[in-house]
Image: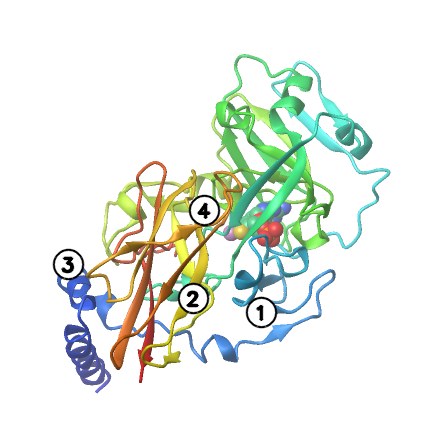
Amino acid sequence: MIRNNSTSHMMTRRRLIGSAGASSLALVSSPSWARTMVDLHLPGGPSARALTTAFPQKAEMILQRTRPPLLETPWSVFDKSLFTPNDQFYVRWHWAMIPLSIDVETFRLKVHGTVARTLSLSLRDILQMPRVELAAVNQCSGNSRGFFAPRVQGGEWENGAMGNALWTGVRLKDVLDRAGVTPNAVQVRFHGLEEPVIEGGPRFMKSLAIDHARDGDVMIAYAVNGAPLPLLNGFPLRLVVPGWYATYWVKMLSDIEVLDEPDANYWTKQAYLIPDTQHADMQPGQKGVPMIPINRMVPRSFITNLSSGTRLRVGEHRALRGIAFGGDCGVAAVDLSTDGGKSWHAARLGRDEGPYSFRHWQTEFTPLEPGKYVLMVRCTNRNGAAQPVIANWNPGGFMRNVIESTDVSAD
Ligand SMILES: Nc1nc2c(c(=O)[nH]1)N[C@H]1C(S)=C(S)[C@@H](COP(=O)(O)O)O[C@H]1N2
Ligand SMILES: [Mo]
């Protein structure tokens, strides 16, 4: 019975998709039937998800989970400014035992392991070091996981588990140099002040290769958009790893350990693994796929001032605008299609805020005939990487990427 239902549902979808112009291309080249039968709307729809203002230093957020807090940035925020306001910057924690206040006088950042000198740095010590500033996107590895088809476990985010901000702090390199890293160092491991809720639960820790940690870009931030970090975004210190997924951006950073062998802790070795394939893509149920730790981000782009279902008037000039980011390098181009991917034209790019920042784009659209239009936006980064036509899939729901489509009509 159920099988019959899903089969006929699948066939209906196939027929629908088959008549939808460029989308049929995606169907033909899609290696997995499973991807074509799934409705991409989250249960209840995003408009039905609860909003909350109950969290400290946070304005209205989408409530994903209360404990530990998972708060998503409402989509409308991304149309308002290139930099995501601190009080609507998304929040994600793995364990719920998060200190609710920090004593700025007694707080210490410890640096130890294979170093010449163990350090115990106060916030005053950190503030006296050379200051650096950088615009960078912080994006959860699982951003947009709610769109994975077939569905996967984890935080069912829409696209709002990301934010762009101006980060201020000190170079991790400068802190490591002060401790004097010894030549046998291979990785640097970071953890924060929160604790597991269950005894013996693995404390959240992430590691970077020693050369990455010392590249001069990785930073220990104490301010975001010109203000101290909100508590839930890591007050008083957090790691900023430009171009890499946010899982590495350890919050409430209190401990830096230089390791002389590869980190074998759960969060580095077993969690946050992606298929070592193009677009981190694999088939549901596929066996023997080599897995590697998630790492650099990939280009993405979105329309922010128009949503699916919008009805336009024939002949109406509509400004289209949105955001793009290159992932681990700057944006080279943003292209728009108003005919479901058959033809593309370049959008105008806004101010360049640096290689790791969101970048605005804009263009116009005038529907000349009544009917349906599929608007698509595609970012190509400065390394030549572009967004794929078909969404990737992997069991962790990581690194979601696809050319986004917005269905509108004109009459
Ligand atoms: N201490 C600590 N840092 C952490 C985490 C955590 O659970 N604990 N989660 C990581 C993950 S998976 C994400 S997506 C980002 C979220 O950063 P934000 O809450 O500031 O948006 O924090 C990262 N840093
Ligand atoms: Mo994350």
- Number of on-image labels: 4
Amino acid type, mark 1: Ile
Q: CA distance from mark 1 to mark 2?
A: 27 Å
Circle 3 residues within 10 Å: few <14, some 14–19, many ≥20: few
Please name the residue that numbered disc 2 is placed on. 319
Residue closest to the far bottom = 1
Coordinates of residue 125 in the picture (x, y in percent): 79, 28
Q: CA distance from mark 4 to mark 3?
A: 31 Å
> Are circles 2 and 4 on residues that touch, CB within 8 Å?
no
Whichever of labels 2 and 4 marks the residue nearer the N terminus, that label is 4
Circle 4 residues within 10 Å: few <14, some 14–19, many ≥20: few
Please name the residue that numbered disc 1 is placed on. 62
Say which residue appears at 52% left-offset and 14% top-offset. Answer: 184
Amino acid type, mark 4: Ala
Say which quarter of the image contains residue 74.
bottom right
Amino acid type, mark 2: Ala
Q: Is residue 49 left or right of residue 408?
A: right
> Are circles 1 and 2 on residues that touch, CB within 8 Å?
no
User: Given this view, does label 1 or label 2 mark the residue nearer the observer?
Assistant: 2
Coordinates of residue 44 in the picture (x, y in percent): 45, 80
Q: Secondary structure at mark 1?
A: strand
44 w.r.t. 149: above or below: below
